[in-house]
Image (cartoon, helix red, strand yellow):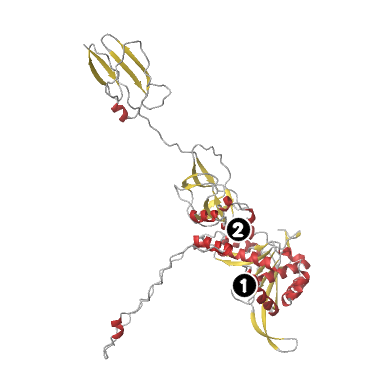
């Protein structure tokens, strides 16, 4: 006679004998364990002729079921029965991801309902953290960088580059990290228009500063704000060399050694070809004839968007304003001498000094005497609002089109302060980083068309302002002095436009005369400076 054991599951050879005794529970079968193939119940039944072990298993994968076929072990009668013990239990596990949240485009203010996606800083599968840049969008007023509120992985991009995204629609799907309860919140939108003193290093990561993570880490380690570094890379991207150059200017640090590659040698003909004279009588080789160019261009149509779309709306509204013009000539000879004396002083302070700070300050001094030129009217032209702040705008030609940032509170700034602010605005305009705060809130505008060329212009008023001036180029022309002598003079022409509904010609003329007197005699500005 023999005892038969019916066993399910992998086991080792019978190494331990089971002593006769009462029925006991297998200590290796614990209900608290959660293996896939863990027995739900385990009992051992002993009889005089047959000892059987029944294991009931929870459902498991086919491969485990195949490995757990019944095995019958025959033991001679009279020998103690050995109960096989499981050597190892099968377990399975998987990594559970967090919830997938839709990252929506929030309201960025100024009544903007749609934007154009200009650049993606992430792609599907990228891991992002809070305040990391997601994309750059461009409205009809400014370029804005959208930053992430969540930590997670990008799962989907909803828009391609140069497509229109609507406010409130999802931009990306972000799978958040598991184990963290995340409530949907409004998107974080940051622009370069925030004051530099308000930044923290975490907020700087969300600004519109294009830089690789390595460059950002280098800036963080050296306590440098990326918004203060002017990028020299493509599209204003900040490079490692820009950070190192910024450090050297601030602390006098020695830059790390960089490999200098010699320029490639010039291509010269072989010595044999130089020494071999051309034989007489032989015709020279015929010159290749350039093929006639074939024009294959095709017309294409594209929708107006961004700043061009804003210009359409602004100029359409400007057509409702009855303009009148006034032109004059300004002798800036003494101002040119004064600027030449102060140019090196300003350069030593790291600021480029042009004529424009003097023009802006003189306009602000004139607005103190003629406040109606620093006013605005409502849409129905029933009320006039006199602006306390002199936010004087400067029309600027950029790669994105015509932009008009403004210098805030000119009435309390010095000429040097204005020069510093102009340097900042020009650097941001060249890199396409002007923010909404820089482009809005203007009360009076000057257009320096002379920096490109031209003498006269007919400027168009920017609603809701009531006046604008266009400055021609400075020319050296012959003029008569007080002794009727012909002398060289620095002459600039100015063209004014004003809203004839509230500004009359006499007011504009008196303002222009006062403004001209400040520029022709810069020492007179000292009397009115505050």
Residue at image position (68%, 59%) is 441
Q: Position of residue 520 (x, y in %)?
A: 72, 77
Horizontal arrangement in the rendering, residue 302 relative to residue 190 (left or right): left
Q: Secondary structure at mark 1?
A: helix
The image's mark for residue 435 is: 2
- Which residue is nearer to you in this view: 229 or 494? 229
Q: Position of residue 181 (x, y in %)?
A: 54, 37
Q: Tell me if I can see residue 431 in this picture.
A: no
CB-based contact (under 8 Å), mark 2 and mark 1: no
Q: Position of residue 96 (x, y in %)?
A: 45, 36
Q: Few, some or many C-alpha atoms within 10 Å of disc 2 (few <14, some 14-19, many ≥20)?
A: many
Q: Secondary structure at mark 2?
A: loop
**Quadrant of the rendering where the C terminus is positioned:** bottom right
Quarter of the rendering containing residue 94: top left
Going from N to C along the chain, the mark reached first, 2 or 1, is 2
Horizontal arrangement in the rendering, residue 316 relative to residue 237 (left or right): right
- Which residue is nearer to you in this view: 446 or 257? 257
Residue at far bottom of view: 281
Rendered view: 92 above or below 101: above
Horizontal arrangement in the rendering, residue 488 relative to residue 34 (left or right): right
The image's mark for residue 449 is: 1
The image's mark for residue 88 is: none
Mark pair 2, 1: CA separation: 23 Å
**Quadrant of the rendering where the N terminus is positioned:** top left
* 2 vs 1, front mark: 2
Q: Tell me if I can see residue 63 in this picture.
A: yes
Rendered view: 277 above or below 58: below
Q: Position of residue 67 (x, y in %)?
A: 29, 27
């Amino acid at each position: 006679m023999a005892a038969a054991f019916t066993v399910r599951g992998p086991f080792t050879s019978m190494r331990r004998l089971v002593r006769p005794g009462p029925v006991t529970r297998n200590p290796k079968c614990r209900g608290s364990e959660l293996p896939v193939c863990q027995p739900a119940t385990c009992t051992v039944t002993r009889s005089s002729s047959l000892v059987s072990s029944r294991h009931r298993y929870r459902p498991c994968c086919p491969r485990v079921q195949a490995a757990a076929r019944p095995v019958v072990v025959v033991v001679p009668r009279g020998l103690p029965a050995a109960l096989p013990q499981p050597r190892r239990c099968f377990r399975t596990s998987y990594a559970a991801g967090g919830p997938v949240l839709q990252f929506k485009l929030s309201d960025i203010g100024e009544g903007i309902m749609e934007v154009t996606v200009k650049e993606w800083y992430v792609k599907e599968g990228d891991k992002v953290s809070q305040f990391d840049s997601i994309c750059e969008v461009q409205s009809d007023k400014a370029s804005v960088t959208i930053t992430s509120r969540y930590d997670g992985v990008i799962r989907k991009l909803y828009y391609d580059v140069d497509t229109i995204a609507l406010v409130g629609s999802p931009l990306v799907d972000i799978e958040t990290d598991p184990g963290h309860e995340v409530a949907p919140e409004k998107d974080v939108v940051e622009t370069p228009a925030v004051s530099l003193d308000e930044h923290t290093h975490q907020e700087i990561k969300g600004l519109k500063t294009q830089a690789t993570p390595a460059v950002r880490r280098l800036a963080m380690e050296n306590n440098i704000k990326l918004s203060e570094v002017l990028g020299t890379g493509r599209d204003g991207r900040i490079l490692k060399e820009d950070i190192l150059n910024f450090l050297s200017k601030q602390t006098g640090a020695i830059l790390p050694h960089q490999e200098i590659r010699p320029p490639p040698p010039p291509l010269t003909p072989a010595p044999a070809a130089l020494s071999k004279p051309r034989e007489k009588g032989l015709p020279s080789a015929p010159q290749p004839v350039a093929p006639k160019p074939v024009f294959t261009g095709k017309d294409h149509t594209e929708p107006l968007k961004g700043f061009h779309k804003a210009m359409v709306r602004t100029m359409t509204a400007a057509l409702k304003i009855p303009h009148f013009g006034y032109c004059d000539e300004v002798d800036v000879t003494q101002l040119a001498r004064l600027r030449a004396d102060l140019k090196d002083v300003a350069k030593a302070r790291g600021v480029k000094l042009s004529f424009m700070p003097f023009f802006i300050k003189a306009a602000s001094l004139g607005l103190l005497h003629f406040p109606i030129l620093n006013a605005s009217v409502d849409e129905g032209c029933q009320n006039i609002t006199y602006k306390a702040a002199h936010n004087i705008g400067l029309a600027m030609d950029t790669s994105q089109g015509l932009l008009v940032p403004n210098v805030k509170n000119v009435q309390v700034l010095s000429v040097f302060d204005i020069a510093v602010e102009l340097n900042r605005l020009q650097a941001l305009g060249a890199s396409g980083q002007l923010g909404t705060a820089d482009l809005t809130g203007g009360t009076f505008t000057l257009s320096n068309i002379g920096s490109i060329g031209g003498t006269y212009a007919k400027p168009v008023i920017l609603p809701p302002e009531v006046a604008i001036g266009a400055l021609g180029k400075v020319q050296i022309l012959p003029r008569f002095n007080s002794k009727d002598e012909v002398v060289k003079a620095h002459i600039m022409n100015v063209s004014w436009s004003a809203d004839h509904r509230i500004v009359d010609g006499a007011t504009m003329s008196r303002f222009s005369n006062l403004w001209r007197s400040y520029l022709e005699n810069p020492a007179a500005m000292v009397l009115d400076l505050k």
